[in-house]
Every structure is written in structure tokens, then in C-alpha cells.
Amino acid sequence: MAKGIEIREAHFPGRAQIDAYGNGGFRFADMSHRGSILCLPSGIHGWDLGEGEPLTVSSIYKVLDEASGIEVLLIGTGQNLKPIPAEVKAALKAKGISSDPMSTGAAVRTYNIMLAESRAVAVALIAV
């Protein structure tokens, strides 16, 4: 007998540029994802953080887990620039990661450039 729909954690196992953003999601690697994403050395992961929700240390645990492959974390904070909370900035710094907040659009553009330069960059993008 056939199984029902299987829901798995959203994950693309590789590094890819972001081709488009908006309408609540992102396009990359000939695929699309609705919602926020984390682009890490291990791949692109769905991220359960929406615009207006607080950024916390626990919300970036995947980034901290992969700290050895990340020098810079860009944080796309949505439509507008929002500061990174002090405890999040401190947790990243303790792992040797510099962080930079910017609007999601600016973070996408900056990430694509840094990725093309083969830099050790990751990005946390809140969907707009």
C-alpha cells in the first residue's frame, strides 16, 4: 500500500547562488523554497524564522554547529535593516564568525558576490 505524503526537513545539499527572492521565498539551483533559509557550507536549509520574530542564539544553532567553515555570516533581516541582538553577536564572535545585518535583498546580493569569490560565507535570510 502506498504511503501518504512524507514531510522532510527542507535541505539542498550544496552551495548555490540565490537566483531570486520575494513573494515569501527564494529560488536557487532550479528550485524554489517558501519561507526563510540558511545557506551554510553543508547546504541550503529551511529556517523557521519569519520577519518580526526575534533572532536568538537558539535560532542560529545550525550556523554555530558549522562555525569551522564560516568566517562571515550575513543576516538578511527582512525588508528593513535590524540590529543583531548582543547575545547572538557574542555567540557568533565566540565561534570566530563576524556578522553583518542588512536587508534581505542586500544580503542576497552580497552573498552571491562572496560565494562567487569562494569566500567562507554563510547567510541567514528572512523571507520577504
Image: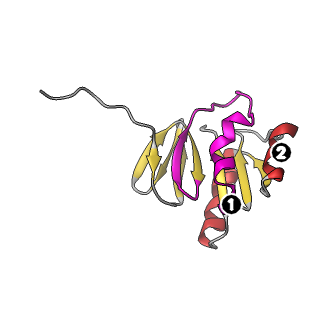
> Residue 29 in the image: x percent, y percent?
43, 57
Q: Please indicate, yes or no, whether residue 85 appears anywhere in the rendered image.
A: no
> Residue at image x 76%, y 48%?
102
Front one among 45 and 24: 45
Residue 46 shown in magenta: yes
Q: Name the residue under label 2.
A: 89
Describe the element under mark 1 as helix, strand or loop.
Answer: helix
Question: How is the rendered protein coloured?
Answer: secondary structure
Describe the element under mark 2 as helix, strand or loop.
Answer: helix
Image-quadrant location for residue 18: bottom right
Q: Mark 1 points at which residue?
A: 68
Residue 49 shown in magenta: yes
The boundaries of the magenta stretch are 40-69
In space, the residues marked 2 and 1 are separated at their CA atoms by 16 Å
Camera-nearest label, 2 or 1: 1
Q: Is residue 71 above or below residue 92?
A: below
> Residue 60 in the image: x percent, y percent?
68, 41
In this picture, residue 26 sits left or right of residue 128: left
Q: Are marks 2 and 1 in contact (CB under 8 Å)?
A: no
Q: Earlier in the sequence, mark 2 or mark 1?
A: 1
Q: In this view, does 26 lie above or below 73?
A: above
